[in-house]
Amino acid sequence: MPSPKVDSDSSLLPKPQKPSYSAEPQHQQPSAQSLSRRSIGSRLLLYTLSAAFLGLGGMAYVFYQVLENRAKDDIQGRLDTEVTAIEGEMAEAEQMMQGLATTVPTLYDLGNSDPKAYEKTILDAFEPRSDLTMALNFGQAPYAILQDRKAYWPYFFLDQNVPDQVGVPLPPPNEHIRVSDVCEIEKELGNDCFKQFFWEEPFALDAPGATVWLEPYPWTGIVMTTVIGPMFDDSGVKLGVVGLDMNVTALSERVKAPEGWGDGYFVILSAEGNLLAYPPDPELASELSSYADIPNLKKVWEQISEEDQGVLVSDGSYWAYQRVEGTNWMMLASVPQSVVLMPVLTTTIGSAVGAGIILVFVVLAFVRRLNERLKPILQECHTVIRADDLAVTGESPLSIPKNADELDVLNHSFAEMTSRLRAAVSELEQRVQERTQELQVAKEKAEVANQAKSTFIASMSHELRSPLNAILGFTQVMTRSQTLSPENQEYVGIINRSGEHLLTLINNVLDLAKIESGKTTLNPTNFDLHRLLDDIHDMFQLKASDKRLNLLLERDDAVPRYVQTDAIKLRQVLINLINNALKFTESGGVSIRIAGRAGDRIYFEVEDTGAGIAADEVETLFEAFTQTETGKQFQEGTGLGLPISRQFIQLMGGDIAVSSQLGQGTIFKFEIVAPTVDESSVERPQAERQVIALAPNQPRYRILIVDDKPINRQLLVKLLQPLGFELREAANGQEAVEQWQQWQPNLIWMDIRMPVMDGFEATRQIKAHETGDKAIVVALTASVLEEERAVVLAAGCDSFLRKPFRDTDIFEVMHKHLGVEYIYAEEELTSVVDQALNRNQFLTPEAIQALSPELQQELQRAIFSGDRQQMKAAIGQIHEQNQNLAEAIAHCVHNFEYDRVLNLLTTEEN
């Protein structure tokens, strides 16, 4: 508590008002002009760029939000550091005061009644004070300690070198300290010290160690505050109060805003809203002016006065706020939005523009090449077709003509994807706005916000992956077609690979969102690590050879073969690292090293002789959406591979490190925990085989396809109908239940997210009313969340399959649950090969020599003349002598393998 100057018009101490306590179209005939405009190349350019730019825009917006939130977290973190420092100073002051509250009762319990002993105790405690401590004192309860006097309140304080101070200075070497008796001075002013608030408030506290922080007050050119509390003897009797005065002005001067904040600053407000620190105008703080005197601060205070901490935006600035524990003070950090948003916007726009430019050039180059190939076909079409432009009116992008082929379906799929992406971006903007508003509410709503983020991830997954399911699925159907020309097969392959690449990019963004929301989990399986490493090495060998690079795989003997961990995540990490190494290496090579370590740990290292990474870029290498200068020069990547890889490695019980020298190369190394398992526990991978027909002697299976998207239903129809399955369709869950009741299908492909009735409810109703043969229900979902599997199975589904799926996945599920058997392409090929081998053993020089020379010459003349009737007649004569030889020659003639027969005939002549 302060020691003011004595005067007749004032009480001894400035009195704060109150203390604070700790606590589906019609068509017109197309014209030649519109035919060119509606070429595959033009439409591909239009759809691809439209969909891709919408996707880039959406991802850029997400990047922006992530970076902005990170910046706000940095501001809150810096504020928390400063608040912690202030709380530490105050805790130190309370500790010093409580020390005196312990020492004085000890002297009392020893029976000491010498005032000098108590004053020396105060002085001894006051001398090792911090720079912020201004005074230390205690006051006895009436007759409590010195029983010969009612009041006794020795007050030791620092001499302020101002005239008319109370008390007397201590003798050297403590002449900078003055001492007075609070009660004596109050008595001279006509006041009773035991009726003052600084006695009554702390003395009313009943718990030992309880304290009261008084509202800060001005004192001899500075602002000061007092912490005061009761003291008790061993039996719990109150002996009095102990107080300590702290220099608030000096404490506030220690709070400095970082240089990177520009015009940003920290503000400290007392419990009553008075300024304790205000860098824009320090004079207001020294006068303890109210927040109400500063309009922008008043606006912020009215929003946060009942909150403990948070971040809001007001008048072009971010305001982070947090209460100082114990004092109920509020500390705020004000940072101009321009300081935070300029780097965020620069990074976001730069990444989006760079990716957009690359995409434009790549698509234009591809379309130009495609149009060069299509030009002769289009010119021939112009001589045959003369019609007006095709006009589409009043049709949803999702409607599909009944006579649509696969390419038409692909066009509708891209249109659907464009529409869905636009809707997703709109929904994203709305939800982000909602999330921003929710940041201003109390802590108890954080769980609701986290659940909303999970819902958003599921929605984004469905809206982006569902159209891709149609795109990738129909390319698989087209690849199976025997009528598609090799050139069109190549185009379909390009579309499929581009779709797979887009799926990878979408999955990367969804992976990052899952990581940030804590939804990423480890899915350990038992697998052959050596085979995984060899497969990855073989995968990249061609790419390395194309660049004339060496790709080495070094695996020591200590590396176990059969291990348990998340094989998918480990594979993704290694592919990311090796792909990056090959991408940025122009000469030399890439080495992959694997070693076994103690404690079920496995060490991985990927070293390249590439461009290297600058030292100042290594620290930000694992930050999302961050690229090195080398990466920017190559203009490749999204900046997500390494951050996602690091998170996956950490999930597997390890971490990743990097060492690099610019111009010499880079080494990425990491360890994971992967326990060794028995070979018998490892499931052998099945080689993918192309299904070409159903095996004979099987029932005709009834399959119901349930999906609200016509494209998705048509995909499964195109896949299953050629094999001979009996198919029906339903557009929602209600139709599915009705079809099940009427038709009793053997298996139902059930989409989950549908209007009218979703897949969950439809499955529940079907499973609840089953009486005879049970229908197998297989859920089809675009969700990437692992917990979706448990929810789907809990609803009664028998199995679970994610979109986009592959045809092999569909066939495998039907084999597993219905026992469907198939004929595969290689089986047919094996039969053909066996027949060919059988024929070859009869087509020999000895067999030809056994024929009469006249018959040999007749066969030779027939082949030279190309007369197939004459050939047939000669083979008929051979059949009478050697049936097997005749069949072998007939096979060669059928396949135009004339040279093979002529070689044998010529050999005999020679």
Image: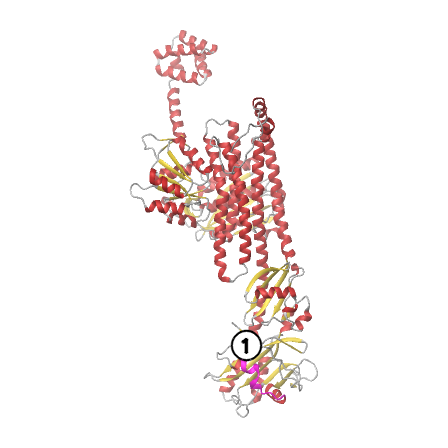
Q: Residues within 10 Å of mark 1 (few under 14, many from 20)?
A: many
Q: Is residue 199 magenta?
A: yes
Where 308 sits versus 595, above or below? Answer: below
Q: Classify residue 594 as left or right of residue 721.
A: right
- Judge whether residue 850 can be spotted in this image: no
Question: Which portion, as a residue range, is magenta?
Answer: 189-201
As rendered, which of 2 and 774 lies closer to the eye?
A: 774
Where 825 sits versus 862, above or below? Answer: below
**Colouring of the image:** secondary structure
As rendered, which of 394 and 248 lies closer to the eye?
A: 394
Quadrant containing the C terminus is: top left
Q: Is residue 465 magenta?
A: no
Task: Name the magenta segment's main secondary structure.
Answer: helix
Where 239 sits versus 84, above or below? Answer: below
Mark 1 highlights which residue? 212
In the structure shown, which secondary structural element does the residue marked by tag 1 occupy?
strand
